[in-house]
């Protein structure tokens, strides 16, 4: 499968520390603009509760599932111990104020 870079949103429409759920080719993705300026994209659903991660609280490079408070890395997609599991991670890039995801 060939990876495609897709524009998903203008960076100005993605407030820091507030998640946003977007859909690309039928796949739901949670976007986050971190306090350090980085933009991260992961699968939008908690692997355990199916909770909407875009509605979770962001702290550093982690998001907390809004249903069970499990911590998910926005870098690796891994649920942090003592819990376990993983969500998909997508490469992001900001070009001229626009956010792209490689899908």
Image (cartoon, rainbow, N blue to C red):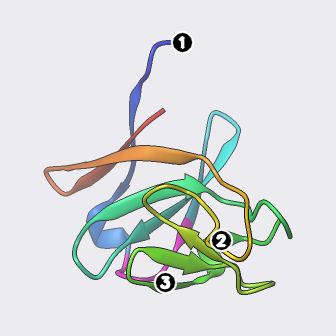
Image spot of residue 77 (x, y percent): 56, 57
- Depth check: 10 or 77 in front? 77
- Depth check: 20 or 75 in front? 75
**Counting residues from the N terminus, which is met first, the one under dot 2 or under dot 1?**
1
Query: Marks 3 and 2, Cα distance to the nearest angstrom?
Result: 10 Å
**Counting residues from the N terminus, which is met first, the one under dot 3 or under dot 1?**
1
Q: Hey, which residue is sitting farthest left in the picture?
A: 96
Instruction: Determine whether label 3 and label 1 are within 8 Å by CB.
Output: no
Q: What's the mark number on residue 27?
A: none
Residue annotated with mark 2: 53
- Depth check: 32 or 99 in front? 32
Which residue corresponds to the image point at 63% horizontal and 33% vertical from the top-left?
25
Q: What's the mark number on residue 1?
A: 1
Residue annotated with mark 3: 58
| The magenta segment | 15-20
Image spot of residue 101 (x, y percent): 40, 42
Dominant SS of magenta comes to: loop
* In the displayed structure image, the side of residue 88 where residue 58 appears, left or right: left
């Amino acid at each position: 499968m060939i990876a495609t870079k897709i524009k998903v949103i203008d960076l100005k429409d993605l407030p820091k520390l507030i998640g946003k759920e977007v859909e690309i080719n039928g796949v739901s993705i949670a976007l986050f603009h971190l306090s350090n300026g980085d933009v991260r994209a992961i699968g939008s659903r908690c692997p355990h509760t199916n909770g909407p991660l875009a509605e979770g609280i962001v702290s550093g490079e982690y998001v907390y599932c809004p249903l069970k408070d499990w911590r998910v890395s926005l870098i690796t997609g891994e649920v942090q111990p003592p819990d376990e599991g993983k969500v998909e991670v997508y490469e992001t890039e900001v070009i001229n104020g626009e956010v792209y995801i490689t899908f």
